[in-house]
């Protein structure tokens, strides 16, 4: 067995990712808090509550843990509803709170990557129609300007919008996100407005901070034909991938949103990215089925033989992250893996999932794909949206009753990887022996 170590490019960013509503706690002025209180929307009736209590100061010890275990970056988001609690009011104390967190990152030698929109919208914006109306664009632009002016001395790496495809699929295709609608045409309008919002944010950031690097984070779902060599399955997999993976990213490349049944010109979006963030978790097989119009005539299933996460939410298919990065090369910009991880409360699957996916990221980098960093989801267990607290994605576990953090074995593995800027045979043998044959064959 080949025992040669693998190493990533010099200057590679190693981090974890968090999002404001999922870790801060006490966010009561946004659409997700409203969704949580409606009843029947979140698994087991869970609510975010105080979450990981970052707003109460727990960010300090969590970022200590990140820095002490070799990470050199962290991806976080800011909460629009805190910074702009009403359309005519800004909360300077909230901005100062975020400044403290960002300064805390720099003090710990963590490069900040800041996301400006991560699923949540202020209630006042929702009441105005939210992203369904193009009136949102100037409001989002003003919010972005306010945040960038406040944080420009500390941050140069910006994510405008996290997973616009998930926001739209979840909220407008029956996926369990607010506003809980099922209207493809309305979802298309939301995508157009998000493209316009992203474009406005891109230009606003560069006007304030010319040296900034601005992109967005896409949820890439690896969609493969269920039956190799059967053209209808291939057609359906390609169609679903075009709609889910390509629409938003393609519009930024060309200025034209191609939603298959409808095409919309969004010229202002063309060329508005300095990098692309890829959030990758899993793969689906797509099988042509005339009885499934609601699934665009392509039923999805998990690949047979794939290791499954504990609630069946994620199938571990490491090759999918390579395919995601290969797909992303078409945009000719640097790439970040802005999220990747698995829910695993007992840390049984995570070590193997981690090293096998990172080996595929290394493979992409070794082929001179422009991969500059990796952010594991997540630093600590957090509120997982419509799934509440039923899934545990953290390197560190969280005791909700005491707010105690529990160090999982994967912390030690990721620490070793960060320090090495690579993966050695000894690391895998110690923490993920089940991956030895795949990585060092």
Image (cartoon, rainbow, N blue to C red):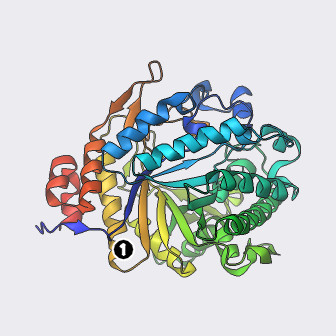
Q: Nearer the viewer, residue 350 or 129?
A: 129
Task: List the residue tagged with mark 1.
Answer: 365
Q: Is residue 335 left or right of residue 361?
A: right
From the viewer's perspective, is residue 100 above or below residue 16?
above
Direction front: furthest residue: 153
Specify the quadrant of the image occupied by residue 233: bottom right
Neighbour class for label 1 at 10 Å: few (<14), some, many (≥20)?
some
Residue 226 shows in the view: no
Say whether residue 289 is left or right of residue 357: right
Please give the name of the residue rendered at 28% of the width and 51% of the height, measured from the top-left corner. 352
Examine the image and state in which quarter residue 61 appears: top left
Of residue 84 and residue 437, the one placed in the foreground of this image is 84
In percent of width and height, residue 99 lies at 58, 44
Question: x and y percent of residue 153 in the render?
Answer: 58, 56
Q: Residue at x 59, y 68 (%)?
A: 241
Say how many tags the image has.
1
Give the image location of residue 123, x and y in percent.
80, 38
Q: Where in the figure is residue 104, as x and y percent of width and height?
A: 47, 43
Q: Nearer the viewer, residue 23 or 300?
A: 23
Q: Horizontally, is 417 left or right of 73 in the view?
A: left
């Amino acid at each position: 067995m080949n025992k040669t170590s693998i190493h990533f490019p010099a200057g590679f960013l190693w981090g974890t990712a968090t999002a404001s509503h999922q870790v801060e706690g006490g966010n009561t002025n946004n659409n997700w808090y409203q969704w949580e209180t409606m009843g029947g929307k979140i698994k087991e009736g869970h609510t975010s509550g105080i979450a990981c209590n970052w707003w109460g100061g727990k960010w300090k010890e969590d970022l200590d843990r990140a820095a002490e275990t070799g990470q050199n970056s962290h991806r976080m988001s800011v909460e629009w509803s805190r910074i702009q609690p009403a359309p005519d009011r800004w909360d300077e104390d909230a901005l100062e709170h975020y400044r403290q967190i960002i300064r805390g990152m720099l003090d710990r030698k963590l490069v900040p990557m800041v996301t400006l929109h991560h699923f949540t919208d202020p209630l006042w914006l929702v009441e105005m129609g939210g992203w369904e109306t193009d009136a949102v664009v100037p409001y989002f632009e003003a919010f972005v300007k306010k945040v960038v002016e406040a944080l420009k001395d500390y941050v140069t790496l910006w994510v405008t919008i996290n997973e616009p495809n998930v926001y739209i699929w979840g909220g407008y295709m029956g996926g369990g996100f607010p506003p809980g609608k099922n209207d493809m045409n309305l979802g298309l309008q939301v995508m157009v407005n998000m493209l316009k919002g992203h474009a406005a944010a891109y230009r606003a950031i560069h006007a304030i901070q010319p040296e900034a690097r601005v992109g967005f984070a896409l949820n890439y779902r690896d969609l493969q034909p269920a039956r190799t060599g059967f053209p209808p399955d291939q057609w359906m997999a390609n169609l679903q991938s075009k709609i889910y993976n390509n629409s938003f990213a393609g519009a930024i490349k060309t200025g034209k949103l191609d939603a298959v049944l409808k095409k919309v010109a969004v010229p202002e979006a063309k060329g508005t990215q300095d990098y692309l963030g890829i959030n990758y978790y899993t793969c689906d097989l797509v099988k042509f089925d005339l009885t499934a119009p609601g699934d665009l005539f392509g039923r999805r299933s998990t690949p047979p033989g794939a290791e499954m996460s504990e609630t069946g939410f994620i199938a571990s298919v490491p090759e999918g992250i390579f395919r995601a990065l290969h797909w992303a090369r078409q945009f000719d910009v640097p790439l970040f893996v802005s999220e990747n991880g698995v829910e695993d409360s007992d840390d049984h699957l995570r070590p193997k999932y981690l090293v096998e996916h990172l080996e595929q990221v290394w493979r992409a980098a070794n082929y001179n794909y422009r991969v500059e960093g990796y952010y594991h989801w997540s630093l600590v267990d957090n509120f997982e949206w419509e799934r509440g607290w039923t899934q545990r994605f953290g390197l560190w576990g969280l005791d909700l009753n005491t707010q105690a953090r529990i160090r999982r074995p994967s912390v030690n593995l990721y620490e070793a990887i960060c320090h090495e800027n690579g993966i050695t045979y000894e690391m895998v043998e110690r923490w993920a022996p089940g991956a030895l044959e795949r990585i060092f064959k």
